[in-house]
Amino acid sequence: MRLSLSTTLFQVAAGLAFSAALAFGATPTSGTTTGKADLKSAGQLAFGPNGVLFIGDAVGAAVYAIETADTKPAATAANLEIKAINEKIAAMLGTMPDQILINDIKVNPISKKIYLSVSRGRGPDGIPVILRIDNTGKLEEFSLDNVKYSMVTLPDAPESKPDAAPKKTPEGMGAGNPRASTITDMSYMDGKVIIAGVSNEEFSSDLRSVPYPFHSAERGTSSVEIWHSQHGRYETRSPIRTFIPYTIDKQPYILATYACTPLVKMPVSALKPGAKVEGETIAELGVHNTPLEMIPYRKEGHDYILVANSIRGVMKVNVDNLGSYKPIVPKNDACKASREPAVSVPQGMKSCGVDFGGTPFETLKDLKGVYQMSKADDKHAVLLQDSAGGDTVAFNAGNATVQTPEIKGTLDLKTIALP
Amino acid sequence: MIAKAALAVCLLPLIGLAQTIQFVDGVFKVAGWRPDRVVPSGGWSSIFAVYAGAEGAPPMLGTYSVEDGSLVFRPRFPLAAGVHYRAVFETPGVPRTEVSFDGAKRESVSSSKVVRVYPSADVLPSNALRMYIYFSAPMSRGEAWKHIRVLDERDKPIELPFLVIDQELWDPAYQRLTLLFDPGRIKRGLVLNQQMGPPIVEGRQYTLEIDRGWLDARGVPMVEGFRKTFRGGPSDRTPPYLNQWRVSAPRAGTVEALVIDFPKPMDYALMQRLIDIPDVAGSVDVDRQETQWRFTPSQPWKAGGYRLAVDSSLEDFAGNRIDRPFDVDNLQPSSGGSGEKTAFLPFQVH
């Protein structure tokens, strides 16, 4: 019901804005409205053109595009260090540090101000809040009460049909549809917002490419099936965990990590509704290791990607010749022919395993306990880091990306030079 | 508000009463001090602020106004349970005032628990993909990976059985958490699968253990922990075949249930949503460890032909869908599916 209502409101707003655009001959910005952006949750963040901040609202099954008007350029990012930022945020929100979740951090590429998406409260009634840190280190709320914004809903594919005969199930009709998708990552590239999600029911591979400005709540939201094929043999649907837009040989790609395997690349041109897209493995960053955040940058004539991992610290991956690296292939014919999995760890086919490979990389020993990372400018990154953290981000003990961190030292936000 | 305050200042003489800070109707108010009509150069927050954190932490977010001649701070968020607040008023010429307030007492009585876990079967295929944990009350996010373990026969936790998705896969009410066994250990051919094998091994016994320390949405631990023992079965890499489903049709004129028995259990949540009898209202039940789907109509059946519509996204325990298995072996072209979105299974009511 909520979905259909917001869609209706959106369509009305779109119609009004379209008339205005005609009258003034401006670039059509159908769907943009001014008022309160009524998010149900604030998760992944991404910046688009002209200071537009995209906020992923997984609970509301929507992405909001907020015109921040934060467009005064700053040449470089400020050198900041804010100790125990989670405690400071909790104090501002009038609650305890264990009652907030810092969901994402992104830097406005124009103003270099840092934006944080936070949940005040950890239950279903948690309140979404956007905070901002200016170049002097001042932390403030970026209020969504009166902003220019547009939004696009992300209708779930297997939505029940509104005209279907009512069915009562053990889940209960009153509780609503228990199916939901979370948004695991989001980026803007070449006029499109690319959104990766994972469903809490069917094993989906939900990657959507939505043209921005948002012209219609429905347009472009058909999801793309992302597949993964290992050794060209076993194919599976593969949810994407995190990704970045990347240009290889002047062609737009996304570099992604699947929920189950390391780094792959896939051309953006292939991300068409209904398409079946397969990523090509370009790096294996270690068993059980999950890249949490990636930052592409260029330094001294070389291209790198800085990768913050779940268990292998922060890696600097050299991607100078990403277009020419050969995909990772089985070591030998026996590995290629291997069909059934190992039955237990000791008997595993370790000889076939590729622990590390593909593009060259190094692990940065100085950067430990990094939970969140965002590019601050061409030479700097902003980190959310446990001051006493180790190589392993202790997932089983909570994780600051959205979980309550069990911080060994203090959870600090700081600017570092890109290595 | 400001104009009203100015009027009040004009009409009433300033009285030298000692000021205090009150918390009334969700707002903090400086009583006994009349604000000047001019906002201080540093803003009202430079003389009046409320703090929820330790010394040195920034003040709470909120807005200021002058109401009925008093300076009022309206916090952006309601006071939280268990939080100690300090309201500080300090301006030249009057004594500094600091008053403490406490949010409501934090609830401490446990009332939540795990009520059900699916699959409910005692045997899970070694490539089982998913588990659902149902709670009796809304829970807190950011807890899951601290409190869930899968133990082996010696009660030793097995290493990383699940895909750790930091956002956590909750339903909107936060009463059902979806766990995915690490697909990298299930999919054939992947490094993880080859090096570590699947998280569940055929023939071995396991215990899913959830400790009571998991906090509910109120921040209170559960009443009790939860344990479920299961055994690893053979891997299942075949899609569910509709022609193997046994459909027991009801009799016309009754509200008997239509019963479908599956040769292998199906996904509990998907079964409720993805099997349908178009245009017939009624209620769905899932039984016999997810091997039976029953539909009881609201109105008696009419004689005639019906059909069961099955969305091809329907999965079994191992993520094999109606239209294709979880991982397709490209060397066996026949293992792919038909590609149809909906499959139909006709039945007759006599």
Image (tube, helix red, strand yellow):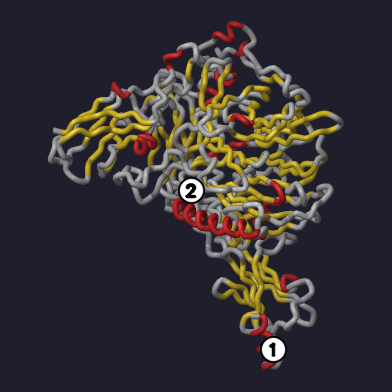
Q: Is residue B225 left or right of residue A368?
A: left
Three-letter amino acid code at the position of disc 1: Val
Q: Is residue A417 above or below residue A268?
A: below
Three-letter amino acid code at the position of disc 2: Met
Image location (x, y in percent) of residue A372: 69, 41
**Quadrant of the rendered structure where residue B305 is?**
top left
Q: Chain of mark 1?
A: B
Observer-nearest residue: B6 or B304? B304
Determine which of the numbered discs, if any, sits on residue B97 in the image.
none
Determine which of the numbered discs, if any, sits on residue B9 in the image.
1
Image location (x, y in percent) of residue A380: 80, 41
Q: Is residue A378 above or below residue A265?
A: below
User: Does the residue at mark 1 contact the one at mark 2 (Cβ under 8 Å)?
Assistant: no
Determine which of the numbered discs, if any, sits on residue B139 in the image.
2
What is the crowding at mark 1: few (fewer than 14 residues within 10 Å), some, or many (at least 20)?
some
Q: Is residue B146 above or below residue B330?
A: below
Observer-nearest residue: A153 or B212? A153
Q: Earlier in the sequence, mark 1 or mark 2?
A: 1
Residue B158 in sight from this viewpoint:
no
Image location (x, y in percent) of residue B131: 44, 33
**Secondary element type, mark 2:** loop
What is the crowding at mark 2: few (fewer than 14 residues within 10 Å), some, or many (at least 20)?
many
Marks 1/2: CA–CA distance = 51 Å
* Quadrant of the rendering where the C terminus of chain A is positioned: top right
Residue B129 in sight from this viewpoint:
yes
Q: Residue at x 73, y 24 (%)?
A: A322
Q: Chain of mark 2?
A: B
**Secondary element type, mark 1:** helix
**Quadrant of the rendered structure where residue B72 is?**
bottom right
Image location (x, y in percent) of residue B134: 41, 42
